[in-house]
Amino acid sequence: MNKLVVLLLAAIFLLSSFCGNNIINPIPSPIGQAPLLYVEMDNANALTNKLSYQVAGNSTEILAAITLHGDSITQIDSLTVLVNTASPARTFAAIQLVDNDQVTIIADNRNVQTATILKNIGQVSSTAKTLYLKASLNLIGKDEVGLIDAEATFQIGKIWARGVNGGKSVNVIYQNNPLLTQTYPSTKFGVVAARISSVAFVDRYQTLVVASAITDTGWCNVAVIRVTTDMSRNTTNSGDTAKMIQDKIRLNFQKSSGTMIDAVQIGRFNPSEEYFISAPYADNTELDMTQSSIGADEEIAPGTDAYFLARVHITVLDSGQDWIQTNLNNLDGDSATANFVWRDGSDAAQKFPLKLSASILTGTKIIEQ
């Protein structure tokens, strides 16, 4: 083998040592070179791969997932969290770095700025390790500093780290790209004064019961919907409790072609009074919860389960195998399509997506008997 070929092979090997690194199986740095630390914002993580709302004044859910590993054992002394929002100090009371168990707090900082430093992170090895970011949010409302409708993302910036063997400074590779000086942004989240934390179809609640079958024309109970709100202590600008307000509910119906329906109603469970909002039937029926005669039934206080009965008025059954099914088919829709049009307080702007774990909920299929 001639000398030129040997030199070319040596050059290829050295280049692969520097440039062939990846987050799954890094190539160790050459002898005498600084250790390498790989850092990645993991927006594919199941806990962080979807837009979310977080309730002001509370501790948040997991907001960001950070994957770290080195080509040798590395001590991370400090890292910088870049806080991308209009006013970090007004929005955040604290930021926490949480261990892989999603509970143990490794580091926190209660003086949140655009560049917030977290210290004494600990060691990482060649085995990938995932750490998480959470936060505590400031209250929103009268005499509070929190900002309504704030949105934020995080990035990991400058890291202070050293190799355990020899104590050399570490070269940090962000997102597997040696040209970057920080990670990609985390998935965006919004801050609200009140929030729907879960929605579910249930078979019954006290006197509200979903029909087990279609037995005749007339009114048929097709769904009971439970809407749950988070606990919170936020207020409106006037100091009243910030409640979750449902301006509209949109229900999606699927049915057999022979099942004729002319009207839809929805009503909130109230043991002392029965009241229903009505609308003409459509495959996607919009029900206006702000009708003056319903009073405060569209308002759901913090930490409350509210139950709503949906029923349809059947005019014709013609096949002997008629059926109908009620769905919430677009929990993350827009102003024209979302199943819920809502506000986080009487003086707040309308919102549309719920940003929960599920985007679609399918109700019970009720069949003629």
Image: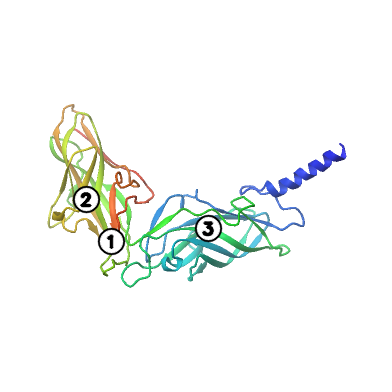
Residue corresponding to mark 2: 308
Which color scheme does this rendered protein use?
A: rainbow
Please give the name of the residue rendered at 57% of the width and 60% of the height, measured from the top-left corner: 157
Question: Is residue 216 positioned above or below 116 on the image?
Answer: above
Horizontally, residue 79 falls left or right of residue 342, namely: right
**Where in the figure is residue 214, as x and y percent of width and height?**
18, 36
Please give the name of the residue rendered at 80% of the width and 41% of the height, measured from the top-left corner: 8
Q: Is residue 340 visible?
A: yes
Residue corresponding to mark 3: 155
**Where in the figure is residue 61, as x and y percent of width and height?**
42, 59
Asked whether the residues under the numbered discs 1 and 3 touch, taking CB atoms below 8 Å apart as contact, a structural biologist would say no
Residue corresponding to mark 1: 345
Residue at the farthest right position: 2
Please give the name of the residue rendered at 64% of the width and 54% of the height, measured from the top-left corner: 126
Estimate how packed mark 1 is, as few (under 14), some (14 to 19) or many (20 or more) residues with alpha carbons within 10 Å: many
Residue at the farthest front position: 86
**Where in the figure is residue 71, as x and y percent of width and height?**
67, 54
What secondary structure is found at the residue carrying circle 2?
A: strand
Estimate how packed mark 3 is, as few (under 14), some (14 to 19) or many (20 or more) residues with alpha carbons within 10 Å: many
| Residue type indicated by callout 3 | Gln
Q: Give whichever of discs 1 and 3 has the lower sequence position.
A: 3
Q: Is residue 369 visible?
A: no
